[in-house]
Image: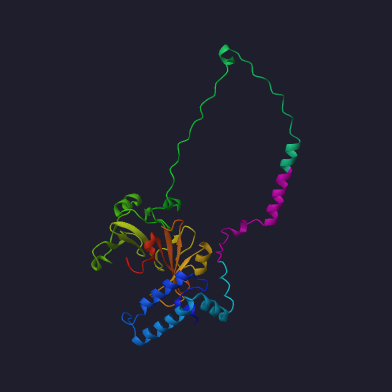
C-alpha cells in the first residue's frame, strides 16, 4: 500500500485534499478514541504520519512519485446498453441511408420542375378608407415565463420522485424551512428521532411520512440543509439529474462530473472515499459515498453535505 492509498486519496490530489484526509484519518485512529486495539491505532497513526510527512512536502512528494512510476490511466467510461424493445421491426442503417437519399432526390426533382409563380398584382383600394395609409401597429409583448427552479427541472416532485439534484429532491429544496418544504412538495415530514436526544434540537434528522425508508433529511434550526439517500436493494433506487444511480460504479460518477473533490471515508478503509461535486458558486452540491468501488449513498444540498455525522 503506497502513501496515497494509506491516506485514501488519488495521486493527483491537491494539497488541501491531502491535508483534510490526514486530519480525518488521524481523528479516526487516535489512540484515545479508536475502538479497536491500541496497538492497531498506534500502527495506523505511524503509517499516516509517515505518509503525510512525504506528501505534504512538494519536493519529497515529487521524488516519491518518481519511485511509483507512471500513474495508472483513468478507468474507462461506463456505457449502459439498452435492449431494442422490438428487434423484429429494427431497420438496418444501410436501408435508412438509401431511403434518405431517395427522399432528397425526389424533393430536388419537385423543386426544379415547379410551375413559375404569377406576377404579383397590386391591390386596388375599393373605398376611401381602404386607401388611407395604415400607421405602425404596436408589437405585442409576451408575458415573461417564470424561471423553473432546479428541482422542477429534474422533472418530478412528491415522494415518488427518484431524481436528486444539487439543490434538493421531490420539490424540497435545500435552504427552505420545514413548513415551506411541506407546502412546496405536498409531503409531510417529521423528526425521526435519530439526533433528538443528542443535542439541543438545532440539528435533527427528518423522514418523509410514508416515503422511502432509505431517504433522510438533515434539518438545522428548522431549515432543510441536506437530503440523503442510501443504497438498499429492497428500497427505491435514486439517481442524480446527470443519470448517476445508487449502486453505479465509481467510474460512472467520474464520467458525469468533472473536477471532483475527494475526502477519505473515516468509517471505512481506503480506497473507500467521499466524492463532492459543487455547482458554480460552491453553495449547492452532491456528495457520493464510494464503498467497494460503488455508489452507496448520495447527499444533496448545502455545504453541510461535508458533515461526517449529523451536524459534525
Judged left or right of residue 184, residue 9 is right
Q: What percent of the width, then of the height, locates residue 60?
A: 51, 79
Query: Which residue is nearer to you in this view: 16 or 131?
Result: 16
Q: Please, is residue 47 above or below residue 12 in the view?
A: below
Does the stretch in magenta take in 226? no
Q: What percent of the width, then of the height, locates residue 97?
A: 70, 53
Q: Please, is residue 135 above or below residue 91 in the view?
A: above
Name the residue located 45 percent from the left edge and 69 percent from the top edge.
Answer: 16
Name the residue located 39 percent from the left edge and 82 percent from the top edge.
Answer: 45
Name the residue located 45 percent from the left edge and 78 percent from the top edge.
Answer: 52
Query: Which residue is nearer to you in this view: 12 or 147?
Result: 12
Q: What percent of the width, then of the height, locates residue 272?
A: 44, 74
- Magenta stretch, residue numbers: 78-105
Does the stretch in magenta take in 80? yes
Q: What percent of the width, then of the height, locates residue 257?
A: 50, 62
On the rendered image, what quadrant is the C terminus found in?
bottom left
Q: Which residue lies furthest to the bottom in this view?
A: 39
Judged left or right of residue 193, residue 65 is right
Q: Please, is residue 253 above or below residue 153 in the view?
A: below
Residue 207 visible to an observer of this rendering: no
Query: Which residue is nearer to you in this view: 41 or 74?
Result: 41
Which quadrant of the figure has residue 73? bottom right
Residue 179 visible to an observer of this rendering: yes
Amino acid at each position: 500500500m503506497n502513501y496515497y492509498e494509506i491516506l485514501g486519496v488519488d495521486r493527483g490530489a491537491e494539497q488541501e485534499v491531502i491535508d483534510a484526509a490526514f486530519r480525518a484519518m488521524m481523528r479516526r485512529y487516535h489512540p484515545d478514541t479508536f475502538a479497536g486495539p491500541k496497538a492497531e491505532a498506534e500502527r495506523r497513526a505511524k503509517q499516516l504520519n509517515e505518509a503525510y510527512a512525504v506528501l505534504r512536502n512538494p519536493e519529497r512528494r515529487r521524488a516519491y512519485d518518481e519511485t511509483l512510476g507512471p500513474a495508472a490511466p483513468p478507468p474507462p467510461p461506463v456505457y449502459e446498453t439498452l435492449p431494442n424493445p422490438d428487434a423484429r421491426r429494427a431497420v438496418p442503417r444501410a436501408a435508412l441511408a438509401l431511403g434518405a437519399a431517395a427522399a432528397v432526390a425526389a424533393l430536388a426533382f419537385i423543386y426544379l420542375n415547379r410551375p413559375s409563380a404569377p406576377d404579383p398584382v397590386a391591390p386596388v383600394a375599393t373605398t376611401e378608407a381602404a386607401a388611407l395609409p395604415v400607421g405602425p401597429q404596436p408589437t405585442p409583448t409576451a408575458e415573461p415565463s417564470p424561471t423553473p427552479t432546479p428541482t422542477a427541472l429534474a422533472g418530478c416532485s412528491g415522494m415518488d420522485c427518484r431524481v436528486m439534484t444539487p439543490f434538493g429532491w421531490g420539490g424540497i429544496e435545500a435552504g427552505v424551512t420545514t413548513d415551506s418544504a411541506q407546502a412546496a412538495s405536498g409531503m409531510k415530514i417529521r423528526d425521526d428521532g435519530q439526533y433528538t436526544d443528542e443535542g439541543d434540537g438545532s440539528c435533527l434528522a427528518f423522514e418523509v411520512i410514508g416515503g422511502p425508508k432509505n431517504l433522510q433529511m438533515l434539518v438545522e434550526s428548522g431549515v432543510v440543509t441536506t437530503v440523503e439517500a442510501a443504497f438498499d436493494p429492497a428500497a427505491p433506487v435514486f439517481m442524480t439529474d446527470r443519470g448517476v444511480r445508487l449502486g453505479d460504479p465509481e467510474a460512472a460518477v467520474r464520467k458525469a462530473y468533472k473536477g471532483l473533490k475527494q475526502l477519505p471515508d473515516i468509517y471505512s478503509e481506503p480506497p473507500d472515499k467521499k466524492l463532492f461535486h459543487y455547482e458554480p458558486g460552491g453553495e449547492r452540491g452532491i456528495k457520493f459515498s464510494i464503498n467497494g468501488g460503488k455508489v452507496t449513498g448520495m447527499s444533496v444540498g448545502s455545504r453541510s453535505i461535508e458533515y461526517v455525522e449529523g451536524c459534525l
